[in-house]
Image (cartoon, rainbow, N blue to C red):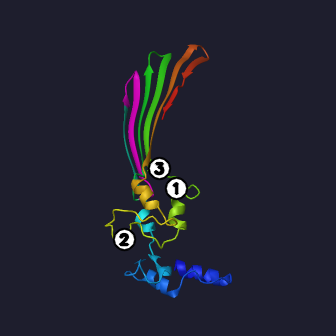
């Protein structure tokens, strides 16, 4: 289809066809995708019709969340504790592509007397992002490789039992980039706290509050 549309576009522009009907026939046949040592050297080359999208892109990217919490207290203390985990798969089937996050939260209120109380809120999260080393959205990046480059080239060099990549010059290299091109592994840690010391009714009509709110982040 790609080659026939290219011919139509060239005909509309008053140019000769880019592909002969014989070459298009090679592409439609599973027995003539790689022509070499032909007496007619003009037809030597690859004639695949390979749509890599189903090989590379997931039909869906599932995610799931798990949370557990407990709360309670008494005359002097109230507490709330929660733990959570979140996972999301990325779009690519091949190579590392996903996101994981763990989080914990503690809310604790201590009533020291009828006047003084301390409310402590602490939250912690750590996340891990695994992604391909190449930028999917950059100019000439992974998605450009997948959707814009020609489909006539194979991933593997024919006759190598899928052990050597086909070096074509103008074909897509997204499969080899995802499988053997390395990856990016990013960690992020966050610790936040809000501590509020309150004096209620220390003097009639007067409430005092002291607030401390630290934030720590590490990559």
Using the rendered view, name the quadrant where residue 81 is placed: top left
Is residue 3 shown left or right of residue 84? right
Region rendered in magenta: 72-92
Between 9 and 115, the residue placed more toward the observer is 9
Q: Badge 3 is on which residue?
A: 133
Q: Identify whether 29 is placed above or below 117.
A: below
Q: Disc 1 on helix, strand or loop? A: loop
Q: Is residue 218 visible?
A: yes
Using the numbered discs, state the Cα–Cα distance from disc 1 to disc 2 in whole angstroms: 27 Å
**Mark 3 or mark 2: which comes first in sequence?**
3
**Mark 1 or mark 2: which comes first in sequence?**
1
Q: Residue at x 47, y 50 (%)?
A: 133
Q: Decide whether the magenta segment is chiefly helix, strand or loop.
A: strand
Q: Is residue 168 magenta?
A: no
The dot on residue 190 is: none
Q: Identify whether 191 is placed above or below 205.
A: below
The dot on residue 158 is: 2
Q: Is residue 75 magenta?
A: yes
Q: Marks 3 and 1: which is nearer the front? A: 3
Q: Identify whether 17 is placed above or below 215.
A: below
Q: Disc 3 on helix, strand or loop? A: loop
Residue 104 placement (x, y as % from top left)? 41, 35
CB under 8 Å between callouts 1 and 2?
no
């Amino acid at each position: 289809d790609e080659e026939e549309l290219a011919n139509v576009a060239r005909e509309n522009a008053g140019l000769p066809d880019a592909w002969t009907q014989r070459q298009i026939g090679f592409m439609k046949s599973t027995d003539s995708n790689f022509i070499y040592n032909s007496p007619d050297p003009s037809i030597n080359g690859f004639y695949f019709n390979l749509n890599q999208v189903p090989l590379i892109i997931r039909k869906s990217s599932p995610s799931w969340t798990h949370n557990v919490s407990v709360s309670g207290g008494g005359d002097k203390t109230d507490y709330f504790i929660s733990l959570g985990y979140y996972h999301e798969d990325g779009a690519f089937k091949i190579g590392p592509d996903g996101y994981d996050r763990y989080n914990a939260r503690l809310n604790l209120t201590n009533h020291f007397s009828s006047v003084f109380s301390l409310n402590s809120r602490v939250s912690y999260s750590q996340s891990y992002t695994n992604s391909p080393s190449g930028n999917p959205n950059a100019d000439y990046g992974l998605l450009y490789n997948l959707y814009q480059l020609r489909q006539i080239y194979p991933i593997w060099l024919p006759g190598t039992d899928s052990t050597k990549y086909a070096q074509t010059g103008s074909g897509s290299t997204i499969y080899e980039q995802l499988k053997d091109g390395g990856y990016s592994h990013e960690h992020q840690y966050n610790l936040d706290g809000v501590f509020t010391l309150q004096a209620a009714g220390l003097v009639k009509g007067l409430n005092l509050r002291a607030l401390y709110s630290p934030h720590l982040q590490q990559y």
